[in-house]
Amino acid sequence: MNKNWKRIVVKVGSALISPNRKGCSSHYLLSIAQFIVKCRAMGTQVVLVSSGSVAAGAHQFPDCERSDITIKKAMAAAGQTEMIATWDRLFDFPSAQILLTHADLRDRERYVSIRDTTFSLLEHNILPIINENDTVTTDKLKVGDNDNLSAMVASAADADALIICSDVDGLYDKNPHTHDDATLLSKVDNIDADIYAMAGGAVKGGVGTGGMRTKIEAAEKAVSHGIDTYIINGFTELSFNMLLNGKNPGTHFTAYEKPMAENEHWMRHTTRAQGEVIVENEFAPALCDNAESLTSKEILDVKGEFSVGDTIIVRKDDGTKLVKARSNYSSCLLNFIANQEDDDFASEFEEKTGPIISKKNLANLEKE
């Protein structure tokens, strides 16, 4: 265990919780629980992100189709209590359940509330167990997979490391389930298109909703916040023993030496754009330094419907993304002033109302 780690996030998937979809099984969870216990004994705080509510509750609906969204939500409701009870039995200290939707994370006030609650639980030696609230979430509100959720949680919790448990030893140059000559990458310093090309499809067996690609997406979110990220084999106790001994059992994605500022990271990696503002290709100022240079005169089109305070993407007409920012105007109002033939009217209106976007609520996308 890295002695500098004061706080870590451990992500456990459905295949570990309920490998046969016949309720929760402690078979693979015992070694994970022991790892968490030992981390806490060494003075390292732990946050657990645990999938598995749908898989754990599926056996209570034997004659129902899992593809039925209503049944799936019911499975999640039934399985969540069983999953939390299973984890609770494995520990001799208290745990707490936190259920989230993406709406909770992308709203700044609620995001800060989640941070404060998590910190308060940790200060009182209570283990936070976090999962997406599948019972109430919708397509517009869901994160979709707990790999990316775990990265958002790790960022919110100011973690030093994120440990993602998988069904393989880490990231291979090709799918190890189908290629005997696949080679494990023990260290990744830069996540680029070549790294994403190595990602396969869904988790073997189809129990979970994520695959290797979502794990790489999660790693990219985490390392940009200065969080070392590991993809390890969660099915073997050796992985956790190696971590405790300061060794790398899988793939280590190294953290940025100069992480993004917390607010910029939240804007870029946690918020979800509700619309787009299209500007002329010639309009390419450094919006991060001069956000107020964006006025209605430069706007060619407004796409999507959004309200004041929603997140938007400003991009050029050729598709180049410039910034992701909080909009100070609704799409309706922005369309109205952008379509005014009288430039003086638009200028006077914006002068009284304020800028379309502000530097304090903005993330640069030009490096994507």
Image (spheres, rainbow, N blue to C red):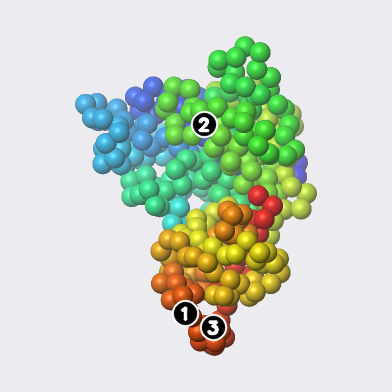
Q: Residue furthest right?
A: 257
Q: Look at the numbered discs 3 and 2 and tell me whether their residues touch, using CB distance below 8 Å.
A: no
**Which mark is nearer the camera, 3 or 2?**
3
| Residue neighbourhood size for the residue with mark 1, other residues' Cα within 10 Å, grouped as few (<14), some (14–19), many (≥20) | few
- Measured in 3D between alpha carbons, the distance from the residue under mark 3 to the one under mark 1, in whole angstroms, is 7 Å
Q: Identity of the amino acid at label 2? A: Gly
Q: Secondary structure at mark 1?
A: loop
Query: x, y (%) of residue 27?
Result: 47, 22
Q: Look at the numbered discs 3 and 1 and tell me whether their residues touch, using CB distance below 8 Å.
A: yes
Q: Identity of the amino acid at label 1? A: Gln
Residue under numbered circle 1: 340
- Residue 198 in the image: above or below residue 261: above
Name the residue: 30% across, 33% down: 67
Query: x, y (%) of residue 290?
Result: 69, 72
Answer left or right for 306 relative to 282: left
Tag shown at residue 343: 3
Q: Secondary structure at mark 2?
A: loop
